[in-house]
Image (cartoon, rainbow, N blue to C red):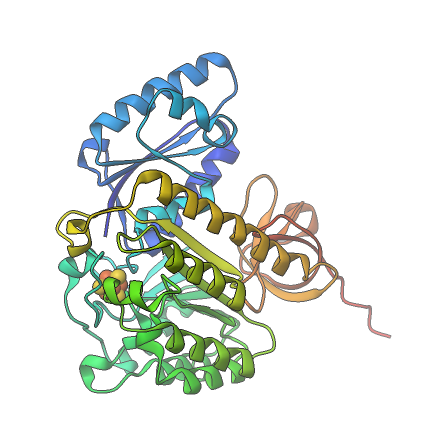
Amino acid sequence: MARYHIETYGCTSNRGESRAIESALRDAGHYRVEGPEEADVAIMNTCTVVEKTERNMLRRAKELESETADLIITGCMALAQGEEFREEEVDAQILHWDDVPSAVTNGECPTPGPGTEPVLDGVVGILPIARGCMSNCSYCITKFATGRVDSPSVEENVEKARALVHAGAKEIRITGQDTGVYGWDEGDRKLPELLERICSEIDGDFRVRLGMANPGGIHGIHEELADVFDRHEKLYNFIHLPVQSGSDAVLEEMRRQHRVAKFLEVVETFDRELDYWTLSTDFIVGFPSETEADHEQSMALFREVRPEKVNVTRFSKRPGTDAAEMKGLGGTVKKERSKAMSELKMDVVAEAYEAMVGETHRVMAVEEGTGDSVKCRDEAYRQIIVRNASERGVEPGDFLDVEVTSHQTVYAFGDPVRAAPEP
Ligand code: SF4
């Protein structure tokens, strides 16, 4: 659970990007503090309109670098003129907006906040179903903060979900450090039962997105789970299954509770049961013990499973963790490996969105986007943007059919399909 500080410069669109970053961080249990001195990580979302702005950005980046533990620079100047920060020797990760949340998370699992109470944000209801995890990953600091699994009963979570739907939630986001181990402390993993009951016992038009489930936690209930997904339209066909590496040797050093074969078994089961679904996964590149051959195994696994959503995190040490004691790899090696994997990610993800062009999908409008647009999610939680939303009368909470007209790597654009008039 990291404390972050964020600064945003420039136009409304850039502010929208910061809002999206903050929403992802909040979902993952991180929280904002005022001022870089209080933060574990500072995020600077830059603008580059006039030369004076650029000079200010460079000066501010230098200040932030000295005031905070880790610095991430994103935004237009970072993407267009990232080398200027490097020339000034600013010690920061320079990233695309989409890659900021996973860099903050550093490979750790999301952590429900201290209250673990449901929250409604627009039409999205966030439902933390449990706290803690069963693992002891060597790079994770979150574990120290949360400890063992603590699962409220299925009944209690169903009632919380019902209350969110009654309060207006159209999308329920089920969160937890590891949703797969929900119920373990009560003697039995109960995620399939919980999803089954939420989808069958709560009336109303809403969707459910399942949050991160570790491959080790979900393995063993994956067949039952795939069956629940297959039977319930309310469940987005989306699984976030962080594999972290394609090498068993690295997974062992990471002290993950799965090996590659277990991860593949889960993926193959979902492939078999569902025609259309999204595999979301995470990779940590540049873990201290990762050899070139290990990295190649991760790249090969990536090509094999072709995930439609991926977080690639360059390993960084978190104080107090065992991995921080290991002799690390050089910055250049980590950078090169992360660049290679990020390029592969762009190809694989773009291919998935490209394949959607021309198709019609049932979507739900989840939130306002930049300009006059709304962000929608289809059956597999892929993002489809509908532009000119007010003219088309589309707003968050609406369900509609859209035809995908084009795409931009990690999301698609679509036009609402008008229902044919009754004969
Ligand atoms: S599964 Fe590993 S990374 Fe996730 S919270 Fe537990 S110890 Fe941390």
137 and 49: which is toward the camera: 137
**In what quadrant does ligand 1 lie?**
bottom left
For image coordinates 41% across by 15% down, the residue present is 55
Q: Is residue 151 left or right of residue 354?
A: left
Quick check: 185 above or below 124? below
> Is residue 35 among the parts visible in the rendering?
no
423 and 146: which is toward the camera: 146
Residue 327, x across and y down, in percent: 20, 48
Residue 2, x across and y down, in percent: 24, 48
The part of the image, by quadrant, that contains residue 132 is: bottom left
Q: Is residue 202 left or right of residue 359?
A: left
For image coordinates 33% across by 23% down, the residue present is 89
Q: Is residue 96 left or right of residue 373?
A: left
Residue at the right extreme of this rendering? 423
The part of the image, by quadrant, that contains residue 274 is: bottom right
- Considering the image in quadrants, where does the C terminus appear? bottom right
For image coordinates 42% across by 54% down, the residue present is 311
Residue 88, x across and y down, in percent: 36, 20
Quick check: 423 above or below 381? below
> Is residue 290 among the parts visible in the rendering?
yes
Quick check: 372 above or below 249? above
Count of labels in the image: 0
For image coordinates 22% across by 26% down, the residue present is 66
204 and 215: which is toward the camera: 215
The part of the image, by quadrant, that contains residue 181 is: bottom left
195 and 418: which is toward the camera: 195
